[in-house]
Amino acid sequence: MKADLLIKNATQLITVKSDKPKIRRKMRELGIINNGSVAVRNNRIFRVDKKINIDAKKSIDASNKIVMPGFVDCHTHLVFSGSRENELKMKLEGKTYLEILESGGGIYSTVNRTREADVKELVALGLSRLDGMLLNGTTTVEAKSGYGLNTKDEIKCLKVINELDKKHVIDVVPTFLGAHAIPSEFKSNPDKYVNLIISDMLPRIGSLAEFCDVFCEKNVFTIEQAKKILNEGKKFGLIPKMHADELYCTGGAELASETGCISADHLLRASDKGIKKMAKKGVIGVLLPGTSFTTMEKYADARKYINYGLAVALASDFNPNCWVNNMGFIIALACYNMKMTPAEAISASTINAAFAINREKEIGSLEVGKKADIIILNVPNYESIPYKLGMGIVDTVIKNGRVVVENGKIV
Ligand code: NIG
Ligand code: FE
């Protein structure tokens, strides 16, 4: 039997093997095979071992390099038009994220630009952003709507996300986030907007999204509103997710556990009780250190959460407030600012992130039968990922068994 592709002599072959979300000590176990090999056949991983004696149509020598699963970026706001570099000055003058939002900036300014943009423009922007992510080793991206905030433009953004999935080699996983902000036209009656989401948007989503997310936050969506939207979303087959306890502790972590969320994300100010409840229910805690960095906020206490048994995942939160496409840099932020070890941060960016978007059977680790989403990095050990800060260490990306990045360039 012949393999389609054989990668051999990897200084470290990092499998991140696990059939459960990694918690506590398991997050530090990366299933490393020194001088390891991986064989690919029919777009899937066919064998993983030290030495594999097999003929292959193509073979790659990975000496002095590490080989690992492609990064799974499980929380992004990929689809929007415009940019917000003007907000840095406001932040430096002491304006908070919510103050910028309340004065009509932030999400609102992006909504205005995104409503004006047509599908063609948004697809073009998305494709070039995905190219940037691919070059940094990301092979699956979750993408949220949320800059339309009316039925027409939310559906438009979901269609763009689905189009991006078809057009780009990266797998793009769609999430409906109609509850991203109360649109200015509904400011005087937020419940009316909640009803619009429930009665007009959710019934039209069909297969355009897999998850339903809510930005549950002080002065944005309340716990009661979030609960209502997530429970209604379930009736349409949408798996619940939340932006929870980011800027204020509102009981988001508790609600995530009670509504059966697959993940709760941000969690900077989650209560101990809430985190313990999430751990017990197996809700993944998606931490987003890039957002703390650009919002100039505190960081989530990953050390404490891991000690509580929470399965921690990491993501970029790519959005106009946090324009980062490099999971290596996110891993660095997680290590230096959230005190995660490099191994924990790698588990969090691969297998645990796959669990956060219901893709654990397909991606997130190098295991026989999984999709051959593999990256080869130009470093001799995994500790170098956070060490070589944003340095472009990605040499090769294999997506679905096909080499799509070679020598750091898209082929
Ligand atoms: O996850 N917090 C809410 N949503 C995004 C930011 C969106 C924006 O500022 O445009 C987040 O950080
Ligand atoms: Fe977000």
Image: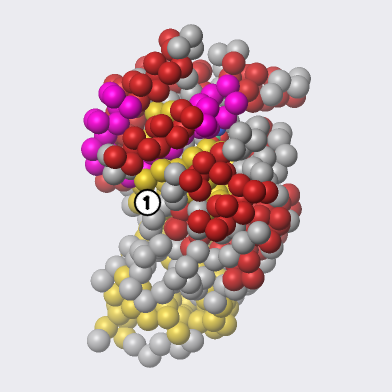
What x and y, as percent, mark residue 273? 64, 48
Residue at 49% across, 12% down: 187
- Taking the image as drawn, is residue 220 in sight? yes
Residue type at numbered disc 1:
Ile
Q: Quadrant of residue 164?
A: top left
Span of residues in magenta:
198-223
Instruction: Name the quarter where the C terminus is drawn.
Output: bottom left
Asked if the magenta segment contains residue 213, the reply would be: yes
What x and y, as percent, mark residue 99? 65, 18
Residue at 69% across, 24% down: 96
Q: How many marks?
A: 1
Ligand 2 closer than 8 Å to the CB at disc 1? no
Q: Quadrant of residue 210?
A: top left
Asked if the magenta segment contains residue 8, the reply would be: no
- Image height check: is 226 above or below 10? above
Image check: 370 left or right of 236? right
Disc 1 residue crowd, few under 14, some 14–19, many 20+, Cα 10 Å: many
- Image height check: is 373 above or below 189? below
Residue at 61% across, 34% down: 250
Instruction: Name the quarter where the N terminus is drawn.
Output: bottom left
Q: Nearer the viewer, residue 201 or 393?
A: 201
Q: Secondary structure at mark 1?
A: loop
Residue corresponding to mark 1:
170
